C-alpha cells in the first residue's frame, strides 16, 4: 500500500474491525491519534517502531500472533520476504506493506488527493483516488474515496458524487477491501464478503 497513511490506517482498521489484533512494524512516525481516528482499537494495537537488525525474526514472530501485520521500513532481503509471505499464508494473517513487496497478491496505491474544509483547526474531508492491481491478472481497478469526520473519528467512504464506484460493505475501509477483492485476491475477498 503506497502513497497514503490515511488510506493505510483506514484499510487496516477495516481488516481488524471485528476484534482482530494489529501490529505495525517499522513505522516510527505513525501518528497514534490518526490511527485511533481511523478506527483502530488501541487495546488490540501493538507498535514496533524499529525492529532493528533482527527484523525478519521480529516480523515472523508478529505474524504468528497477529491478524493484521503492517510492515514499513525493515531490513528484509528477498529470501526474508518470501519466508514471511509463506508464514502469513500458513497463519491466515494479512500482511500490508507500505513499501513495494515482490510477489504481493494485491498492490494498492493512493493517487491524487485533495483536502477540504477547516473546522476547529483540522481539515474535515479528503478525497483520494485509489488504484488496485492484482497478481491474479485482473485489470487494474480504481475508485475515488472520501475520508470524512464520523463519530469522533474518521471514516472512509466511496465518493459517488464524483463517479466513484459504489462498493459493498460498511465500516471504515470496506470500500477498499471490496476494491481489492475485485482484483482477484481470494483472502481479501473473504474479508470483504
Image (cartoon, rainbow, N blue to C red):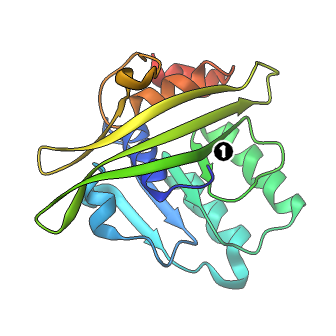
Q: Is residue 32 above or below residue 174?
A: below
Q: How many marks?
A: 1
Residue at the limit of the structure toward the bottom, as seen here: 52
**Residue at 36% in and 60% down:** 45
Which of the pair 158/60 is nearer the observer?
A: 158
Residue lying at 55% horizontally and 46% vertically, measured from the top left:
112
Instruction: Determine whether the residue tagged by mark 1 lies in a helix, strand or loop.
Output: helix
The percent position of residue 3, horizontal first and vertical second, equals: 59, 55
Residue found 45% across the figure and 15% down from its top: 193
State the residue position of label 1: 88
Question: In screen coordinates, is 157 left or right of 63?
Answer: left
Instruction: Where is residue 163? Give x, y as percent.
Output: 45, 20
User: Within 10 angstroms of label 1, few (less than 14), some, or many (20 or more) residues?
Assistant: many
Which residue is more in the foreground, 170 or 18? Answer: 170
**What x and y, as percent, mark residue 31?**
37, 71
Would you say 41 lies left or right of 106 here? left
Q: Quadrant of residue 109?
A: top right
Amino acid at each position: 500500500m503506497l502513497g497514503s497513511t490515511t488510506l493505510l490506517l483506514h484499510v487496516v482498521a477495516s481488516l481488524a474491525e471485528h476484534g482482530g489484533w494489529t501490529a505495525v512494524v517499522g513505522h516510527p512516525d505513525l501518528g497514534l491519534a490518526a490511527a485511533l481516528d481511523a478506527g483502530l482499537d488501541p487495546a488490540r494495537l501493538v507498535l514496533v517502531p524499529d525492529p532493528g537488525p533482527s527484523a525478519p525474526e521480529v516480523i515472523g514472530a508478529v505474524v504468528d500472533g497477529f491478524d493484521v501485520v503492517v510492515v514499513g521500513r525493515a531490513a528484509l532481503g528477498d529470501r526474508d520476504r518470501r519466508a514471511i509471505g509463506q508464514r502469513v499464508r500458513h497463519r491466515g494473517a494479512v500482511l500490508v506493506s507500505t513499501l513495494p513487496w515482490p510477489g504481493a497478491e494485491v498492490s494498492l496505491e493512493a493517487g491524487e488527493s485533495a483536502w477540504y474544509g477547516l473546522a476547529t483547526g483540522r481539515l474535515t474531508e479528503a478525497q483520494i483516488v485509489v488504484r488496485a492491481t492484482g497478481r491474479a491478472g485482473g485489470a487494474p481497478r480504481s475508485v475515488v474515496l472520501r475520508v470524512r469526520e464520523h463519530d469522533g473519528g474518521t471514516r472512509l467512504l466511496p465518493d459517488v458524487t464524483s463517479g466513484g464506484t459504489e462498493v459493498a460493505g460498511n465500516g471504515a475501509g470496506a470500500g477498499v477491501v471490496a476494491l481489492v477483492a475485485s482484483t482477484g485476491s481470494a483472502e481479501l475477498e473473504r474479508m470483504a464478503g
